[in-house]
Image: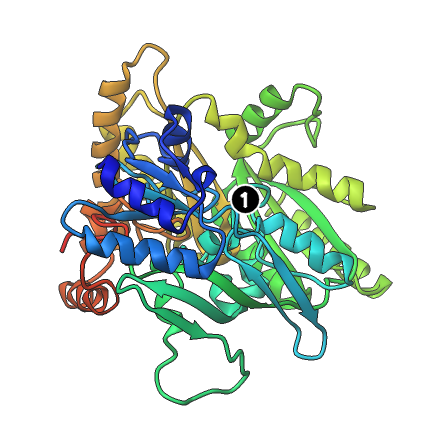
Amino acid sequence: MDAQLSELKKFLKNDQISTDVQDLENYGRDWTRAFSPKPLAILFPQSTHEVQLIVQWAITYKESISLVPSGGRTGLSGGAVATKGEVVLSLQRMNKIGDLNEIDRLISCEAGVVTQDLQEFVKNKGYFFPVDFASRGSSQIGGNISTNAGGTKVIRYGLMREWVAGLEVVTGAGEILKMDQALVKNNAGYDLKQLFIGSEGSLGIVTSAILKFTTPPEIPTVILLQSAKLDFSTEILKRFQSRLSLTAFEFFTQTALEKVLENQKTESAPFQKSSPFYFLAEFEQKSDAVMDEALAIFDELKAEGLIIDGTLSQNDQQREKLWGYRENISEALSKFKPYKNDISVKISEIPEFVREVEVVLTKNFPKVDIIWFGHIGDGNLHINVIRQADQLDSDFENECKDISQKLFEVLKKFNGSISAEHGIGLLKKPYLSLSRTPEEIQAMKQIKKVFDPHGILNPGKIFDL
């Protein structure tokens, strides 16, 4: 292998190739901890041409070399994990942001640009890039595209797919596809870029993108509501969505809030008394009339017993504080190394689905603590199971597999998806057939063979060939 790696020095500098133990550990994994990273080396290309040369090099040794594309490594499905001596291809040095085109409302950037950096760049020009999530400070645009990232504002702005106007991709065949015309209307054959969005780096490596942006929301305002039942969520959402310009609608439980307060220590609870559920709605306060309408909805919901109490942000600082109760949940739970799953069902079926899941899991795993939160406005739920304090890692890992099976059986009954945001990767590969038909999976495999004929890109992810 040393001889093969040494050939990379024909077109990469020494500092672009690493076999350092710490680098192998760091770049060989994502946020999942179910797999042990065992990469052969980490490469840091600085251009599309270098990515192409790396892929062509891997093709030369296709019997022994495969590539795992790596971005910010914030995924939760094992999609960026190298477990079998693969070479990790990190895009982090490809982090240039191009000019902002105000007429077409387009901006070009390389795959390694951090999501928050792009958001800030666009914001400083007076515009808004709406794909947003708690990992914005670590995730990268290439990874956002490869997983078709969603986040907190999907209810208003849609998934990452909606904001990709053009792509440059190096396929597994070592070819560069420049799908960068970025036209509003272009029906000249297949829209190939759509195949690479959400493909988890299994078809090609995204090296740059042309992205859309928009105008920022006018005076974003947050209202945090207490409620006794999750069943009330659909009516609360319907009431707000029909009368206000919503940008987000989230939920979390009292248990989740307690974990945040314990972790932050300096944060105070938003209400004097606790409640089982909390709903966070963000809307545009374009006028005083909008605020009057929001308060009228609040009064109606309280009078009807759908909510207990609420608090409304009066400025950006208060808005960020209210968002913090929701966005800091993952960080607060991370020290417990919980079982996490990212799933989706129809919005109207969320209460019934959660109720059935809790019945099934409580019956089969009576000692587990279940914590729910998520993007209720688009049907995306995050379930977290906290291990018992004295439970061994191996026992918890085995229990998690059983939990997944039970969870996904209920999910199939509701015709939901086993992955809403983070892809399939390694973690959910055994359950793909619960969300996709055999015919769909076979079609995916055929597409894989077209763009990655040698099977060198992210092998073993999503499905086995």
Residue farthest toward the top in the current orientation of the protein: 390
Reply above or below: 379 against 437: above
Q: Name the residue nearer the viewer: 422 or 54.
A: 54
> Would residue 71 appear left or right of 36 to someone viewing this image?
right
State the image coordinates of residue 165 (x, y, percent, origin top left): 52, 73
Q: What element carries label 1?
A: strand
- Quadrant of the image occupied by residue 246: bottom right
Reply above or below: 286 against 78: below
Q: Name the residue nearer the viewer: 383 or 451.
A: 451
State the image coordinates of residue 115 (x, y, percent, origin top left): 58, 51
In the picture, the quarter occupied by the C terminus is bottom left
> Would residue 435 appear left or right of 223 to someone viewing this image?
left
State the image coordinates of residue 335 (x, y, percent, origin top left): 47, 21
Q: Name the residue nearer the viewer: 231 or 93.
A: 93
User: Residue drawn at (57%, 48%), measured in percent from left and top?
Assistant: 114
Tell me which amino acid carries mark 1: Phe
Q: Which residue in the structure is indicated by mark 1? A: 251
User: Residue drawn at (67%, 47%), measured in percent from left and top?
Assistant: 302
User: Residue drawn at (71%, 49%), measured in percent from left and top?
Assistant: 222
Exactly how many numbered labels are in the figure? 1
Residue farthest toward the front in the current orientation of the protein: 10
